[in-house]
Amino acid sequence: MSSASVKKSAVEILDDEDFKSLHSQKNTISIILTILELVLYFGFIALIAFNKPFLAQKLSPGGATTIGIPIAVMTIVISWVLTAIYIFWANSKYDVLVKKIKEKLIGG
Amino acid sequence: MPQQAAQTMIGQANPTAIMFFVAFVLSTLAITYWAAKRTRTTKDFYAAGRNITGFQNGLALAGDYMSAASFLGIAGIVSTKGYDGLIYSVGWLVGWPIIMFLISEPLRNLGKYTFADVVSYRLNARPIRAAAAAGSLAVVITYLVAQMVGAGTLIKLMFGLPFELAIVITGALMISYVLFGGMIATTWVQIIKACLLLGGATLLVILTLAQFGFSYGELFSQAEKMYTAKFLEPGGLVTNPVDAFSLGLALMFGTAGLPHILMRFFTVPDAKAARKSVFYATAFIGYFYILTVTIGFGAAVLVTQKVIMGIDKGGNMAGPLLAEALGGNLFLGFLSAVAFATILAVVSGLTLAGASAFSHDLFVGVIRRGQASEKDEVKVAKIATVGLGATAILLGILFKGQNVAFLVGLTFAIAASANFPALLMSIVWKKFTTYGAVSSIYTGLAISVVLLILSPTVWVDIVHKSEKEAVEKQVKGIEDGVKAKIAEIEKQKAPGLDAAKLAEIDASIAAEKTASEPQIKEAKSKMPQPIFPLKNPGIYSMAAAFLMGILVSLMAPDKEAEAKFAGEKVREYIGIGAED
């Protein structure tokens, strides 16, 4: 439970400009990244379902590696990069705003 | 194929493997002893005192998620099916970013020990805890049985131990970790296992790539030479796009509904650490799948499919065989012990999650209406641990020799349909009500179970197994008969025959084929048909759970819950009042 007493009620906090900005930024970034992840994975599945010949193309003439292999690996890597983007945003923006709001409500 | 089995130590009591395994067991039991002294309160037992760092929790999450089935199974599918195995492995990772973007911080900020804490935050706790416990236990028990049966089979293959003994050893160790060491011991077992598994797989990949001059291109060239270009192209895995989409949904959102994964978010000190742990977990798991796929291709080339499938038709021994080929008995022993440790760690995490659904949600939340001393709660959790462990051992033995692969699909379908929709709606939707949550959970649970039973995987492959096999046998009989006849006719093709005669022979071959077609068609028409066409029900069961939650909430609004949403939102976003 909260150790410090909060100076404002929850409803008042919701009206706070900083909280509003935090709320909308966090939702926007979460939704965008979730959609990107969905497009990434289901795009990959759609390629397999509807365009197998594309994935079966050779990466270089004479080589054996098909385009499908790096695409599958990139799906994994990009998923992780998306989490990195979120972390980067959260560490630089989200945490700062949370700290600011908390100070205003409790500490400040 | 006995002559091939003789070349490998797999399937025999392997002293090196046993030595490594005993070392693992002794060190984890020592940790359990150390953890037992630090496990006093409910917070210690369920959440390791919330003292786990983001990095440690990332490793532990990866440890919870990387099962022996994925390590041995994916390497096996890749070695036997090539590119299709790679497609399969991608699906297992994509749920992690979703966890991070949608639920990691709210979960940590709103919850205490189980995800039911979050769902019931501003709603009527009793019915929700009962429903959430049903969802959690359904996931835990199906997954536990799948892991146990897999464990018995794999341990028998690797160590030559009898199936039942393997299950009893696994069950006894998992109960000890959870019973005495709670979340602290379970977390450290996961961390050690994750390090061993990642280390062992990395070493195996380095040894493999060394055979190809550290060039993936060279590895794939050799694979193509041995198994044709088809091996590196998508094959028959995705034939029905709707089915693939449905499975994809279940994998993606099911990960975010697995109670043993969700529970880990309460072991870190704050939301920042929770978020960080998903970042590390995603990195470890993604890296692990890339390693596993490499091991699969390496085994196909260096061990060959013939040898791999000679030992186990499903290809599960591809990784261990590759280790034996490249690092001898010592490496095989090490990797076998790591696989055993992997199984143990996963079932321990599941048991702890199941026990907390019993004690925290059912006992305290439902039976005692939220009023119970910490001492009583821990006691019930411990009794539940023993009960669940015993159930897992019994069910594991009962399901011996059964095809349990469908249980993994069921686990993810239930997690995605019963647990995830209610969790997400409770976090984001102001108008979500108690009845909405309860009906969403039970709908998701019931529909995923019923549809899976009616699906091809259970209805055709298990319920109507004998009919299916009879039809297959009949079809094969007709085909073999035709083949024999054709072979007989082909014999007339002596060299020097004139073209007219050759054409006549070809025509009679074609006639034989045409004559057999209606017969085959008729035989196939008796094939048992599934009542529900898809292999995975995710698309329907998830949609039904969301729809039910929304409709019921809108039909009977709950003003009190709506009023409390402001408080929930503040705590969700800035963590004021979060459990510390």
Image (tube, rainbow, N blue to C red):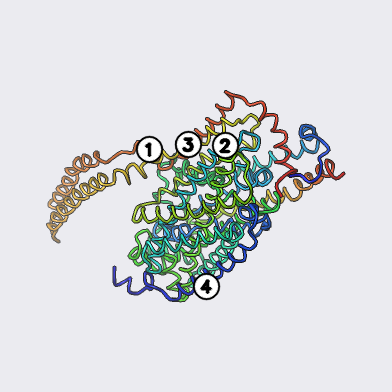
Q: How far apart in space, not on screen, are marks 3 and 2 (Cα)? A: 19 Å
- Callout 1: residue from which chain? B
Within 10 angstroms of label 3, few (less than 14), some, or many (20 or more) residues?
many
- The image shows residue B53, relative to residue B576, as above or below, that is below
Question: Mark 2 against mark 4, which lies toward the viewer?
Answer: 2
Q: How far apart in space, not on screen, are marks 1 and 2 (Cα)? A: 32 Å
Q: How far apart in space, not on screen, are marks 2 and 4 (Cα)? A: 43 Å
Image position of A78 (left or right of B579): left
The residue wearing badge 2 is B128
- Callout 4: residue from which chain? B
Which quadrant of the view contains residue B400?
bottom left
Q: Earlier in the sequence, mark 4 or mark 1?
A: 4
Q: How many marks?
A: 4
Question: Mark 4 against mark 3, which lies toward the viewer?
Answer: 4
- Residue type at mark 3 is Ser
Q: Disc 2 on helix, strand or loop?
A: helix
- Residue type at mark 4 is Ala
